[in-house]
Image (spheres, grey):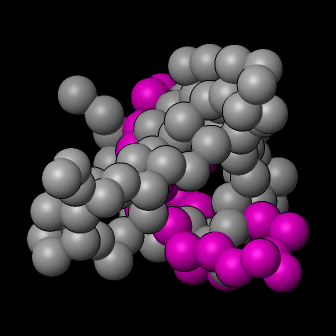
Amino acid sequence: MGGEISVYYLGELSNNPVAFYTITEDALEGEDADHLKVKGTIESVDGDVFTLKSDDTHSFRFTTDGNNDLTKEVETNKGKTVEVSYSTSLKARVSLAESIKVAE
């Protein structure tokens, strides 16, 4: 019997969906299991909201929610490829960025 996997994606399953993260059963116990992450390039910044463009051209919007240090980090890294850790809900119009690090 195979293991369990969860795949979060954009688009229609029948029309080239884009997986932006996957969670395998063995990863559920890991330290990173509680953190959502996405990698892309900071495309634009508007106050405390920024847009991240992934390699497949999909865009994600995040807020720094008034965190001045995080907003400064976003502005400093505009145009660079970064990994954003975030939290979200089904009601949120934008996800809450929790941390940003320049991708290697």
Please indicate whether residue 63 sits to the left or right of residue 71 in the image.
right
Q: In the image, is residue 73 above or below residue 16? A: below
Residue at figure coordinates x 36%, y 70% from the top left: 35
Q: Is residue 92 magenta?
A: yes
Tell me which corner region of the image, top left, top right, bottom left or bottom right, holds residue 34: bottom left
x then y, percent, for residue 24? 27, 55
Q: In the image, is residue 78 above or below residue 85? A: above
User: What span is colored magenta in the figure?
Assistant: 66-94
15 or 37: nearer the viewer:
15
x then y, percent, for residue 22? 40, 48
Residue at figure coordinates x 72%, y 33% from the top left: 13
Q: In the image, is residue 67 above or below residue 27? A: below
Tell me which corner region of the image, top left, top right, bottom left or bottom right, holds residue 93: bottom right
Residue at figure coordinates x 35%, y 54% from the top left: 5
57 or 42: nearer the viewer:
57
Whether residue 35 can be seen here: yes
Please indicate whether residue 76 sits to the left or right of residue 94 in the image.
left
x then y, percent, for residue 17? 68, 28
Q: Is residue 34 magenta?
A: no
Tell me which corner region of the image, top left, top right, bottom left or bottom right, holds residue 9: top right
Residue at figure coordinates x 70%, y 79% from the top left: 89
Q: Quadrant of the C terminus?
A: top left
Q: In the image, is residue 19 above or below residue 4? A: above
